[in-house]
Image (cartoon, rainbow, N blue to C red):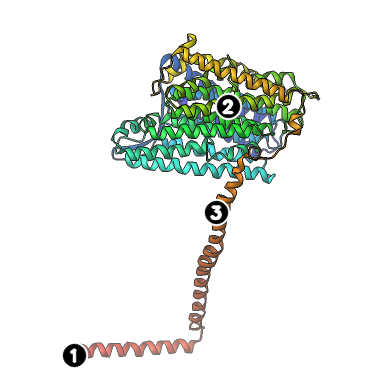
Amino acid sequence: MSVLAILLLAPLVSALLIFLINILFPYAKQYLYTFFALMGSGVSGLLALYVGYYSYFEKEVFISHLFTWLSIGNFSIEVALKADALGSFMLLFVAPVSFLIHIYATGYMDKDKSYGRFFAYFNLFIFFMFLLVLADNPIIMFIGWEGVGLTSYALIGFYFKDIQNTYAGNKAFIVNRIGDFGFLSALMLLFLEIPSGGFSFSNIFLNLAQMEPSSLTLIAFLLFVGAMGKSAQIPLFVWLPDAMAGPTPVSALIHAATMVTAGVYMVARFAPLYNMTPEISLIISYVGALSALLAALIATRQYDIKKILAYSTMSQLGFMFMALGAGAYSTALFHMFTHAFFKALLFMAAGAIIVAYHHKQDIRELRGIQLPKIFKMMAIASLTIVAIPPFSAFFSKDAIMGALFVNGHVGIFMMAFVTSMLTAYYMSRMMFVLFFSKSKQEAMESPKSMLFPMMLLAILSVFAGFLNFPEVFGGNMHISHWLGLPDRAVLIPHAKELALMGINTFFVLLVIYNAYRKYAYTETIVTQHNDGLVANKFYIDALYQRFIVAPIAIISHFFEKWVSQFLIDNAINWSAFGYFKLGEIVAKAENGNVRLYALYMLFGVVFGFVYLYWSLRGAL
């Protein structure tokens, strides 16, 4: 069995074993579930590092053909796995970060009644994410895409006895189905356009030049609709904040390196297509910019620690889509790389606080936290997300800003700049409220199983940016050269690049200072009015409810009552009633009376003779 097959199947086998143990041995010891959960994700993590090493240093492309799904003439669909530079790069952070979150989850979920069920879902989730990343054709990618959606539904609504959690899981599932309809429609159009040779990515890209421009534009747009759903961009973002209903390790896994990054990865995978459809690329940039700005604005008035981080995820994904639309695919993926570490760390730190303080999540109730280790690691993650040098996101986010500026997207650049300032504001607000307060709240530090992964992520949050160190500082842009994506040329003079970095950093520090004056050791957060346009998330959920959900509910009720029940059910019932009455009439003729049967025979004989007489008479 190949390396890729083992990497893919290890978490699937673990998930199946945990399911079986959970069903057949409901009182099995917790350490048994822990062993299989960490074994599955750990094997995948190690193999991902192996694949990444040989991909980067040896330029090796790993391919594993599993079986042929469909073969018609010279057209075939293969179930094959492929780890080229892009796939290997994705595995390099998706698999190890997933493993670290698994370790963290063993401490967070300790003694939970559904411990086994949780890790079965968790391993199944990363199996589908690996399938999505390793798929050599978009149909297999779509299977992983849908699998991630299904398991996220199960994990978000994990505590299903609380109806609100179930609603949150339903919301995520339904909104993502809208996006998935776009993805699936694009695949259908691609299937019709590819004449022969197979449906692999390489063959699709070879045939792009023969397609009509209108078809390419429609396919590119529909694919992006799928990305909008999975990566929570306007207008399909409303599911992401409610996804916080699941346990915090779920939030860390979904937001850091798996589900929400799938849309960014898919657009980068189809980079040759988007280079041929510049008008769709421009739409992608604007949607990303508006999503980033909207999410950052909403985050400035949130009080739930996890929802602040949820909106920050949507905002950071917006930065990635801005870069994708500008043709800076490698830069977008570099920011995804750094984001995986600091966002996982932020959610893990938030989870540690939530557990330590009896599942409080309102930052107004958590003022004055006394957890030194958690503070240090959360401070590192916060400084990273606001792009303070030399933390990793400083290099990745400023690379996006530079690409936007040089490519002439001035409006998008300004939205990105304002979003960057808002990011500094809401993250500083959260940190100063939590840790810089006159009140003091003592608590026990987290167990080692939770602290150890966080320490590793803190180190990566600081140093991961040096893997794509910019040329202005004497770096070699290792990740960009490794990926080899068809980036549009971005040539920015070093003086201008340094000026942009300096201006951005200066204003970020200024915002942090103002946030410190406003929230550190004050009662401002308590006295703020929790109302208004921003505090109510621009009433977007209410607008969705009124103008989309409610009308659909009315139409559904109409069809259920008048079409389904009145027309269809009544038609079937009246048909059945008619057959029943007809059966009663016919049954009277079969009453068991011998004399009546003899009369039937007499009528039959007479009819036979009459028919015979008229037949013979006509013949004569």
Q: Nearer the viewer, residue 602 or 72?
A: 72
3D distance between C-alphas at marks 2 and 1 = 96 Å
The earlier-in-sequence mark between 3 and 1 is 3
- Is 325 on the left-hand or right-hand side of 615? right
Mark 2 or 3, nearer chain start: 2
Residue 318 appears left or right of 192: right
Q: Which residue is mark 2?
A: 98
Q: Secondary structure at mark 3?
A: helix
Res 47 visible: no
Q: x, y percentage for residue 254?
A: 58, 32
On the image, which quarter does residue 510 sit in?
Answer: top right
- Per the image, the residue denoted by label 3 is 552
Residue 87 spot, x, y in % from top left: 45, 25
Where does the image place residue 41, in percent across and percent down from the top left? 57, 27
Task: Report whether 463 appears left or right of 365.
Answer: left
The residue at 45%/42% (across/down) is: 182
- Look at the numbered disc 2 and give the secondary structure of its residue: helix
